[in-house]
Image (spheres, rainbow, N blue to C red):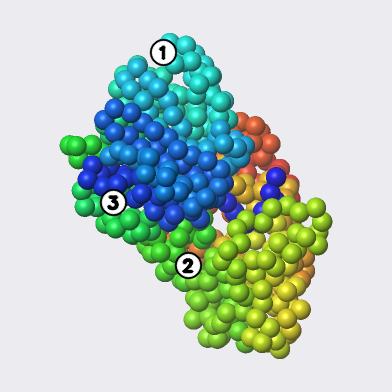
Amino acid sequence: MERHDSPRCECGVFGIWAPSQVVARITYFGLYALQHRGQESAGIAVADDERIMVYKDMGLVSQVFNEAALTSLTGNIAIGHTRYSTTGASQWENAQPTFGSTPWGDIALAHNGNLTNTGALREWLATIAPLTPVPVKTRMDSTTDTAILTGLLAAQPGPVDQAIQAVLPRLDGAFSLVFLTTDALYAARDRHGMRPLCLGRMDGGWVVASETAALDIVGADFVRDVEPGEAIRIDADGVTSIRFAKPEPRGCVFEYVYLSRPDSVLEGRMIHNVRVKIGMLLAKECPVRADLVIPVPDSGTPAAIGYAAGSGIQYGQGLVKNAYVGRTFIQPSQHLRQLGIRLKLNPLKRVVAGKRIVVVDDSIVRGNTQQQVVAMLRQAGAAEVHVRISSPPVRWPCFYGIDFADPEELIATHMDVDEIARAIGADSLGYISLDSLIAATHQEPENLCCACFDGKYVVTAPPGDARRLGLPESGLGQATYKKGLVVRAASTHD
């Protein structure tokens, strides 16, 4: 398994209803815009008035689809998916969209997020699936929560709108969904709106996507976000809203830090502008005497621009990123693992030599990347290396669609800031405070999920993880952190 040192978001989703457009090709470009949200597999499902076709495979969007594949995908409705796995193995059976046959017609579905009550949902599916004309096995070859969800929707006796009302209120965790039948496109977002999902209008049709950047790429105009607890149906009659749960907004704060593209807009705020503001606040909270501010590209760039503006220190490019290197897989020796970082980043020696450097990154997970970046800058002749991080220390795992390491592997659960600075070899280390991070988003604190930073889980965790971390197995709760040890849980309910 890959041992990564940065947060990974599970998936990106895209959907289009446009009878006058070549929907498969538009979906292909939409997935290209969402490639950063998942690089393990990609898939597109298209529907006409009679049937649904699904084409998916392992790899990047450009590797999965070619001219022949796109030409074969004809219809007037399409959904697409690009995946990074947080549940289910990285294998073809778990690629999306998933497919199911129902008494009322076929369905294909794609999912961004992570359900936390899959055990209960699997039991429910096992009890109702024998009553449907399609055996459970045809839908359960996959090991993902998405396959379970598809099976549950397909097993309902009524039409899609009734299936939505029967199934979606019973889901715990995070989900932004796009799914289709032969005559309509659907999208839905969990009651907390943890993962983003937006609606756009284009010539001759409608588009839904994980991020507004995907709307821009395909020439659609942003209309609004799909609301927490809302499903929408798009067909020849237009857009119909279906409310299945009371909204309780708890958007993921890490979308602002890292996950979303900087050119996307979330809750009315351009992500790039939020990250620049984070950097400016970071400069005020963690000042240092230095000659040059540089980012770890590309995710650290906006915050580094903000840090330079806030501190008055010159901004520059001190690290060059190889745009053609993807994910670095585990190698058989420490030397080869270090070479994996060097394939991605290389210092500009004449820029950094002899200078006191502030290097800005978005987060520290295990610390391996930052350790090697600091070492590379020192080898390039930097006089001092000061690390600044545009998020608070990551101390808790995420159960809602971001693949953070377990607490035992998160460096901040075992070390304080000074200890981490010594571990990565930096002259100093500074993190932005959670209060300043939230202030930069312009969101109310109660409308954000910050569990990876503060241990306050706003949605039920999976039972096994809840017991392991000392969390309540239902309702809201907070785990208490003590130098690498979860010692107790304090429920926020009476």
Residue 350 can be seen in this image: yes
Mark 2 or mark 3, which is nearer the start of the sequence? 3
What is the number of the mark on residue 275? 2
* Quarter holding residue 48: top left
User: Which residue position holds label 3?
Assistant: 200
Comes first in the chain, label 3 or label 1: 1
Q: Residue at x 71, y 77 (%)?
A: 377
Q: Nearer the viewer, mark 2 or mark 1?
A: 1
Residue located 58% across and 73% down the image: 295
Q: Which mark is residue 292?
A: none
Whole-percent x, y for residue 68 in the image: 42, 45
Residue located 25% across and 51% down the image: 201
Label 3 is placed on what type of residue?
Answer: Gly
Badge 2 or badge 1: first in the primary sequence? 1
- Between the C-alphas of marks 2 and 1, the distance is 51 Å
In front: 357, or 178? 178
Helix, strand or loop at mark 1:
loop
**Alpha carbon of mark 3 to alpha carbon of mark 2: how far?**
24 Å
Determine whether label 2 and label 1 are within 8 Å by CB. Answer: no
Name the residue tied to disc 1.
133
Mark 3 → mark 1, Cα distance in angstroms? 36 Å
* Whether residue 474 is visible: no
- Per the image, label 2 sits on a secondary structure element best described as helix
281 shown above or below 448: below
Residue at left 24%, top 52%? 202
